[in-house]
């Protein structure tokens, strides 16, 4: 079977692993990640492929990870090699090739992507965030639900700990019905459609909270990287090599642009919620949901690229003393720079669709 081992992703035997760093976040589940998609969710004919998953490598290429062993590491093949390695799997290869072209595998962008590709899941309800991730996103819930509660029910009936779902789970049935009627009257949404509206609203704000969570979690890595690459740029060996110096500058500029632009986009989308809160009705919600969902694919794509780049960089250089200038420069040229300009292009297109000015190189 033709394939390759991803040594960058290779793991060590658990008995030799150092103790986890204080405050270090645990690895995300496949359903919470942007760069992983379990193929068991897709109706493939090959059982071997159904136990595999798609992953994005350091160069943002999509590979099929057949297994990941604690000792031998990750064994991967490219989608175009499936039929050669799995006889009779031409149909599976066609499906996986389509999936491989997607820029992100986060659950929110995947919903539209799968529909666009005409692919159905064995269990559509499984395309959702884990309970652990939902719990982690709770800290953002107040920002999205409190204004709605204040606008509809008034400050006396809302507090910082409440959310829409909680308000309608009150054991006092008469109070719940009264709240539903108030909400229906204030929003012009039929009474029987209010529960569905709340569920849809929850999903929309959850998606934006998820992207914000991902962005904030890679923020420290991007910040450390900016100091790391600035120091590398100023090293005499790099300064004396124009091609390497140019790669460092392009990578540094792209990371800085992507970071600031995503922050601006998230702020713009947050503002869309504020506009919605001032005039809550079925049409305004349709517009809000459309705007947020239109940004799922691009937010997922750019954040996926940043997560993969920063994660692989941190694995290779866990602290500022790791690696000399030659090793660092080679990593920039071979692992960080490839695909970074495409991320910049995707982000500029997304900015224009959101009404923001594109930024030049």
Image (cartoon, rainbow, N blue to C red):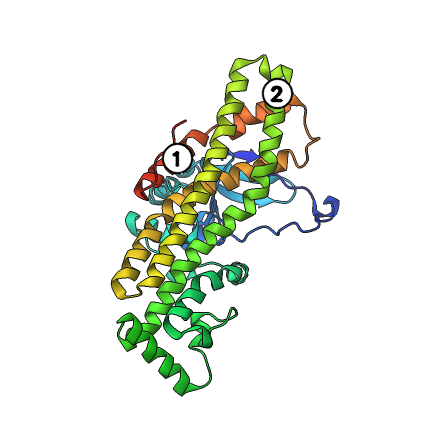
User: Is residue 223 toward the left or the right of residue 346 in the image?
Assistant: right
Answer yes or no: is residue 44 visible.
Answer: no
Query: Label 2, label 1: how many angstroms apart (C-alpha)?
Result: 41 Å
| Mark 2 surroundings: few (<14), some (14-19) or many (≥20) residues within 10 A | few
Q: Is residue 313 left or right of residue 146?
A: right
Compare residues 41 and 287 and report the one nearer the observer. 287
Mark seen at residue 80: 1
Q: Which residue is mark 2?
A: 234
User: In the rendered image, is residue 183 in sight?
Assistant: yes
Q: Secondary structure at mark 2?
A: loop
Where is residue 55 drawn, in percent x and y? 48, 42
Which x, y percent locates residue 162? 49, 71
Q: Quadrant of residue 203?
A: bottom left
Q: Is residue 65 left or right of residue 179?
A: right
Residue at image point 61% right, 20% down: 234
Mark 2 or 1 closer to N-term? 1
Q: Quadrant of residue 298?
A: top left
Under circle 1, the secondary element is helix
The image shows residue 188, relative to residue 225, as above or below, that is: below
Q: Residue at x 30, y 47 (%)?
A: 117
Q: Is residue 308 above or below residue 186?
A: above
Q: Residue at 38% of width from left, 49% of height from top?
A: 296
**Disc 1 packing (10 Å; few <14; some 14–19; many ≥20):** some
């Amino acid at each position: 079977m033709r394939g390759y081992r991803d040594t960058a992703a290779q793991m060590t035997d658990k008995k030799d692993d150092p103790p986890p760093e204080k405050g270090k976040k645990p690895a995300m589940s496949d359903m919470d990640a942007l760069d992983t998609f379990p193929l068991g969710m897709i109706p493939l004919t090959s059982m071997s492929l159904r136990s595999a998953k798609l992953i994005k490598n350091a160069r943002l290429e999509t590979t099929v990870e057949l297994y990941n062993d604690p000792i031998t590491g990750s064994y991967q093949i490219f989608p175009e090699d499936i039929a050669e390695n799995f006889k009779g799997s031409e149909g599976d290869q066609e499906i996986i090739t389509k999936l491989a072209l997607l820029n992100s595998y986060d659950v929110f962008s995947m919903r539209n992507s799968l529909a666009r590709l005409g692919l159905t899941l064995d269990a559509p309800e499984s395309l959702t965030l884990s309970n652990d991730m939902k719990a982690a996103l709770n800290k953002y819930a107040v920002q999205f639900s409190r204004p709605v509660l204040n606008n509809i029910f008034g400050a006396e009936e809302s507090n910082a700990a409440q959310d829409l779902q909680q308000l309608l789970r009150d054991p006092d049935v008469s109070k719940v019905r009264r709240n539903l009627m108030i909400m229906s009257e204030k929003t012009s949404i039929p009474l029987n459609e209010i529960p569905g509206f709340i569920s849809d609203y929850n999903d929309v704000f959850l998606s934006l909270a998820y992207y914000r969570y991902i962005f904030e979690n890679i923020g420290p890595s991007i910040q450390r990287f900016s100091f790391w690459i600035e120091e590398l740029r100023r090293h005499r060996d790099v300064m004396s090599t124009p091609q390497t110096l140019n790669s460092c500058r392009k990578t540094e500029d792209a990371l800085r642009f992507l970071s600031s632009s995503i922050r601006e986009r998230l702020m713009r989308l947050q503002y869309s919620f504020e506009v919605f809160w001032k005039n809550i009705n079925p049409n305004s919600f349709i517009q809000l949901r459309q705007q947020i969902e239109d940004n799922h694919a691009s937010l997922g794509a750019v954040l996926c690229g940043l997560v993969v780049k920063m994660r692989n960089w941190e694995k290779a250089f866990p602290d500022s003393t790791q690696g000399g200038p030659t090793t660092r420069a080679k990593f920039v040229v071979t692992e960080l720079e490839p695909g970074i300009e495409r991320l910049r292009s995707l982000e500029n297109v997304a900015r224009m669709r959101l009404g923001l000015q594109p930024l030049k190189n």
